[in-house]
Amino acid sequence: MLTVDDVTEALRQVFDPELGLDIVELGLLYDVQIAAGEITVSYSLTSMGCPAGPLIQEQILEAIRELPGVEKVDLQLTWDPPWTPERLSEDAKLLLGFGF
C-alpha cells in the first residue's frame, strides 16, 4: 500500500529546469492524498507565469503513474497560499542564496 512518503519520494524526481532543484526541496508540493488507488497532489509553481509549469505537471504525472497500484492521478495546481521563498527547504535556501 502506498504512503504519502512513497509519493513524496517519487516526486523528488521532478525538477524545475530553471532552478535545478526538485519540487519537494523547492516547497512546491503542498499536499498528497491517497484513497483506493487514487492519488491527489496539490502543488504550486514559483510564479503564475512559470514557463516550466506544463513540463512540471507532466513530470509529476509520470512520476506518480510509475508507482505500483496507482489507478488515477488528480493534480490540483493552487495559488493559495502563494509560493514564497520561505517554503524552500534549508538546503535549497543555501543553494539559491536565501540562507545567511
Image: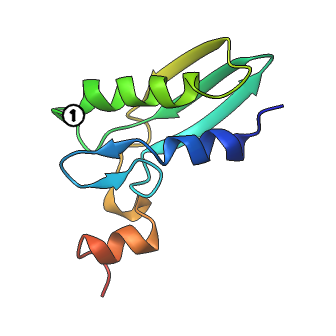
What residue sits 69% from the left and 30% below the top?
33
In the rendered view, tell whether residue 51 sits above or below residue 46: above
Image x and y of residue 4, in percent: 71, 41
How many discs mark residues in the rendered view? 1
Report the side of 25 relative to 32 (left or right): left
Image quarter where the N terminus lies is top right
What residue sits 75% from the left and 17% below the top?
37
- Quadrant housing residue 72: top right
What residue sits 39% from the left and 30% below the top?
59
Image x and y of residue 79, in percent: 37, 34
In the rendered view, tell whether residue 94 sits above or below residue 72: below
Amino acid bearing label 1: Ala
Image quarter where the C terminus lies is bottom left
1 or 90: which is nearer to us?
1
Mark 1, Cα crowd under 10 Å, few <14 / some 14-19 / many 20+, is some
- Quadrant housing residue 54: top left
* Farthest residue, direction right: 1
Report the side of 65 relative to 13 (left or right): right
Report the side of 3 relative to 31 (left or right): right
Image x and y of residue 94, in percent: 32, 78
74 or 77: which is nearer to us?
74
Q: Which residue is mark 1?
A: 52
* Farthest residue, direction bottom: 100
What residue sits 45% from the left and 66% below the top?
89
Q: Secondary structure at mark 1?
A: loop
Image x and y of residue 6, in percent: 68, 42
